[in-house]
Image (spheres, rainbow, N blue to C red):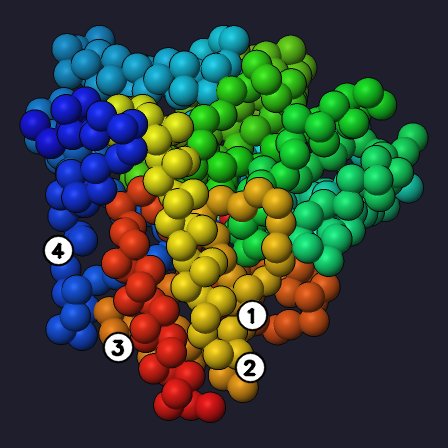
């Protein structure tokens, strides 16, 4: 059994990072002959053994299609699948398991809301309010439905420190605003937005709210009861789970009022050529065979972060991030993007005179994996006057020594190239 036992957590309440690392087989990999230093968890997190084991165990012992067979194996598979939905419900603090819709990823969850919830309510001149710091996944789906109706996507500006300008945000919620959508944590600046305040501003004006929690749920505790939003999305692959599984949470009364999005098996009640009636939520939005094994193994990903404790994860990652800010600040010519009051996991930076792509390629030769480019946030980079940046992001398995290795490599690269 590879699950981290409470004994592996030190009595101070801090996290035993070596015990955590031992659960991730990929961390023993070498890259270009060097130990892997994985600092790209914001793009996707690595997987603990218990998630990998759950995937193989399911295929070896329990695999069958779900919700269709009367035979034992199908019922077993269905039960394991359905168990994850309850797990996600408890993880988020959702009122009802029927509010949890399985999709492919956060992106698909946003598209589902765009087409099934928003599009039928949109008219010419309507507005969807987002922020300048959104990932493309929280911009483009709204643009697609806006372009069909003559509505438009309005960005709320950010401040020079990289936070949402709350006054401007509040001002932009007007009578034509049909939805407000924003990220909890910026995937470039690392800014942790005051989401409860932002939700309250929108709800006070009766405008529904979608929260993009793709960079949030893996870093600190999330409780829907304290949030009061209408929709929330995240991807399991960033939460140490399998790729191919995402979650859309929506208020039951809103989901119930929404028409289906995609048609097919499982989402129907009765089908005839005279007409078709649709299944209840959440099944109405889950047409076709899902990533059954991925959903089953996702329960282990949630178990992994819950066993460690999201408070302990937040503390560990917060310490590392503070260490990274100090270590990177000492690299000549390096500028960290933004200086928000609260930040999680992510630091993006540029180095004067060095192209971000070169930084990424040279770090790779030292076994260090970071992200370079626009990180699917081109409007944010345009706002910052940049085409690209380099980004390091922290997961629960990272160490102070890895941050030091990054800083040392960056100094060497600067010395070489500048
Ligand atoms: N929103 C944010 C803030 C993200 O960082 C990402 C992934 N980089 C997404 C949405 C989209 O996630 P996915 O590609 O898993 O759908």
What residue is shown with label 1? Answer: 335
- Label 3 secondary element: helix
Q: Are marks 3 and 1 in contact (CB under 8 Å)?
A: no
Q: Are marks 2 and 1 in contact (CB under 8 Å)?
A: yes
Q: N-terminal of the two: label 2 or label 1?
A: 1
The image position of residue 193, as x and y in percent, is 63, 39
What residue is shown with label 2? Answer: 352
Q: Is residue 62 left or right of residue 284?
A: left
- Label 2 secondary element: loop
Q: Identify the residue shown where x is 59% and y is 17%.
A: 226
What residue is shown with label 3? Answer: 365
What residue is shown with label 4? Answer: 28
For the N terminus, the image quarter is top left
| Between 265 and 328, the one nearer to me in the picture | 328
Q: Which mark is residue 98?
A: none
Q: Are marks 3 and 2 in contact (CB under 8 Å)?
A: no
To which quarter of the image does residue 86 belong? Answer: top left
The image position of residue 279, as x and y in percent, is 51, 13
Q: Residues within 10 Å of mark 3 (few under 14, many from 20)?
A: some
Q: N-terminal of the two: label 4 or label 1?
A: 4
| Between 144 and 241, the one nearer to me in the picture | 241
Is 32 situated above or below 26? below
Q: N-terminal of the two: label 2 or label 4?
A: 4
């Amino acid at each position: 059994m590879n699950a981290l036992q409470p004994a592996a957590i030190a009595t101070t309440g801090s996290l035993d990072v070596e015990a955590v690392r031992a659960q991730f087989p990929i961390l023993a990999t070498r890259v270009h002959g060097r130990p892997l230093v994985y600092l790209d968890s914001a793009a996707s997190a690595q997987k603990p053994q218990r998630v990998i084991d759950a995937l193989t165990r399911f295929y070896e012992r329990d695999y069958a299609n779900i919700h269709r067979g009367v035979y034992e194996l199908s019922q077993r598979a269905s039960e394991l699948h359905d168990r994850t939905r309850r797990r996600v419900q408890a993880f988020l603090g959702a009122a009802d398991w029927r509010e949890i819709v399985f999709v492919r990823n956060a992106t698909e969850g946003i598209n589902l809301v765009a087409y099934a919830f928003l599009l039928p309510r949109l008219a010419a001149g309507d507005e969807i309010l987002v922020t300048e710091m959104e990932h493309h996944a929280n911009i483009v789906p709204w643009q697609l439905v806006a372009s069909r109706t003559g509505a438009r996507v309005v960005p709320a500006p950010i401040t020079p420190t990289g936070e949402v300008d709350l006054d401007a945000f509040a001002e932009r919620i007007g009578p034509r605003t049909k939805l407000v959508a924003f990220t909890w944590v910026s995937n470039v600046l690392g800014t942790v937005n005051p989401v409860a305040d932002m939700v309250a501003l929108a709800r006070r004006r009766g405008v529904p709210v979608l929260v993009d929690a793709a960079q949030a749920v893996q870093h600190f505790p999330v409780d829907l009861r304290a949030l009061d939003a209408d929709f929330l999305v995240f991807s399991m692959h960033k939460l140490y789970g399998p790729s191919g599984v995402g979650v859309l949470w929506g208020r039951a009364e809103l989901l119930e009022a929404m028409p289906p999005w995609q048609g097919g098996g499982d989402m129907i009640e009765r089908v005839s050529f005279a007409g078709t009636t649709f299944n209840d939520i959440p099944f109405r939005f889950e047409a076709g065979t899902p990533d059954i094994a991925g959903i089953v193994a996702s329960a282990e990903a949630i178990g992994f972060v819950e066993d460690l404790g999201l408070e302990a994860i937040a503390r560990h990652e917060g310490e590392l991030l503070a260490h990274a800010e100090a270590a990177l600040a000492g690299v000549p010519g390096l500028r960290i993007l933004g200086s928000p009051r609260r930040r999680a996991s992510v630091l993006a930076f540029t180095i004067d005179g060095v192209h971000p792509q070169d930084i990424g390629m040279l770090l790779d030769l030292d076994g260090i994996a970071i992200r370079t480019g626009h990180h699917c946030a081109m409007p944010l980079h345009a706002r910052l006057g940049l085409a690209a940046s380099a980004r390091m992001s922290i997961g629960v398995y990272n160490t102070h020594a890895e941050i030091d290795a990054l800083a040392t490599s960056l100094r060497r690269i600067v010395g070489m190239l500048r």
